Image (spheres, rainbow, N blue to C red):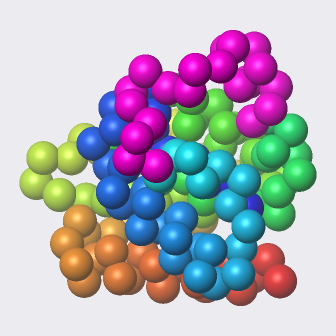
Amino acid sequence: MYFAGSIRGGREDQPIYDQFIKYSQYLGCEILTEHVGNNTLSSNGEKLDANYIHDRDLKWIEASNGIIAEVTNPSIGVGYEINYALSNNKPVLVLYGKSANSKRISAMIEGASGKYPYLTIYNYNRDKAGILKAKNAIKKYIGTLS
């Protein structure tokens, strides 16, 4: 499984990424991008060549059964990864956490939901109950891949 979340676009949601990654692993998924949830990874990103990261990540998407993308914090890279996954017929679960101060989900992502049968968007509230519901959405999504 490929997990996408903002790195250079901001790390405010890192604790949520970490929860979703650990929960997916608990369900038996190998997460190729578990570093996205790591609290030592700053918005400076990995200390690797950008070309290397690009090529590695696209290979990981190609090798994955699907992609879980948390898009509450807008990220050009995450949008790119979602598009690449959809272009390669990979099932995509997009998680978007609603709160009083969150931005709206990208119209490009929201508008794609009716065009790709293997794209699911799940809106959740950014509280304890909402995150639990998002984890249930992850469990359901992973179950469809088996």
Extreme residue in the left direction = 100
The residue closer to the viewer here, 41 or 73, is 41
Tell me what residue is drawn at x 48 percent, y 85 percent.
Answer: 136
Highlighted magenta segment, given as a residue range: 38-57
Quadrant in the rendering for residue 59: top right
Where residue 30 sits: x, y (%)? 73, 67
Question: Is residue 67 visible to the viewer in this orientation of the structure?
Answer: no
Where residue 82 sits: x, y (%)? 65, 43
- Residue 53 in the figure: left or right of residue 95: right
- Residue 41 in the figure: left or right of residue 4: left
Tell me what residue is drawn at x 44 percent, y 60 percent.
Answer: 18
Question: Is residue 99 visible to the viewer in this orientation of the structure?
Answer: yes
Q: Quadrant of the N terminus?
A: bottom right
Tell me what residue is drawn at x 43 percent, y 21 percent.
Answer: 44
**Magenta region includes residue 44:** yes
Q: Is residue 27 above or below residue 104?
A: below
Where residue 64 sits: x, y (%)? 82, 57
By secondary structure, the bulk of the magenta-drawn segment is best described as loop
**Magenta region includes residue 15:** no
Q: Quadrant of the C terminus?
A: bottom right
